[in-house]
Amino acid sequence: MSNVRNRSGFSLIEIIVVVVIISILVAIGSTSYTTYVEKGRDDRRILDVEMLREVLEKYYSNQAGGFYPLDTSDLIVGGYMQRRPADPVTNQQGAYRYTPLPTGCDNATIYCSDYTLEVDLERKGSQYAVSSNEINGTIVP
């Protein structure tokens, strides 16, 4: 009889190598997934801003003399939309900042002839901004 044993299974080194490889793949995958989810939420914010812009332009065109509302709640009261969009993470409606311009306009003595609309994005602390006098929104770092 010989003293040679028939060993089956994996050595400790082989198991460690496999665990390290799996850990690296999980780390890469989770980072990519997080970036993908953030981009999706940012895209939602941008779409919400663009929708608000369309509603604001419709409001403007329906006002005698042409002016923008003092607040986005006027869009709901006027039947232009059912509710203001909410941020995908915080579910707060105040995430979309609307500023009628010129400063001090009241639509009685001074018409709100312009506006800016901004939202914070998750991508590197940037913002997406639109205004009444530009065609495309811009991502501001």
Image (tube, helix red, strand yellow):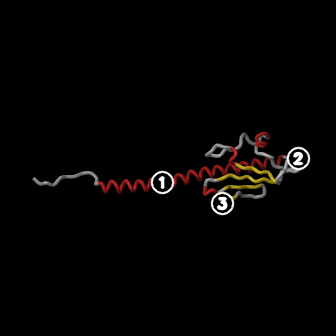
Q: Amino acid at mark 2?
A: Ala
Residue at mark 1 to residue at mark 3: CA–CA distance: 26 Å
Q: Earlier in the sequence, mark 2 or mark 1?
A: 1
For image coordinates 71% across by 57% down, the residue present is 137
Please indicate whether residue 79 sits to the left or right of residue 140 in the image.
right
For image coordinates 51% across by 54% down, the residue present is 31
Circle 3 Cα neighbour tier, 10 Å, few/some/many (<14 / 14–19 / ≥20) = few
* Circles 3 and 2 in contact, beta carbons < 8 Å: no
Q: Which mark is residue 94?
A: none
Using the image as rendered, state which of residue 54 and residue 37 is in the foreground: 37
Residue at disc 3, secondary structure: loop
Residue under numbered circle 1: 29
Q: Quadrant of the C terminus?
A: bottom right
Q: Which mark is residue 141?
A: 3
Residue under numbered circle 2: 108
Residue 80 in the image: x percent, y percent? 76, 42
Residue at mark 2 to residue at mark 1: CA–CA distance: 56 Å
Farthest bottom residue in view: 141
Residue at disc 1, secondary structure: helix
For image coordinates 59% across by 51% down, the residue present is 40
Image quadrant of residue 132? Answer: bottom right
Residue 123 in the image: x percent, y percent? 61, 56
Q: Earlier in the sequence, mark 3 or mark 2?
A: 2
Farthest front residue in view: 104
Q: Earlier in the sequence, mark 1 or mark 3?
A: 1
* Circles 1 and 3 in contact, beta carbons < 8 Å: no
Residue 99 in the image: x percent, y percent? 77, 51
Q: Amino acid at mark 1?
A: Gly
Residue 66 in the image: x percent, y percent? 85, 50
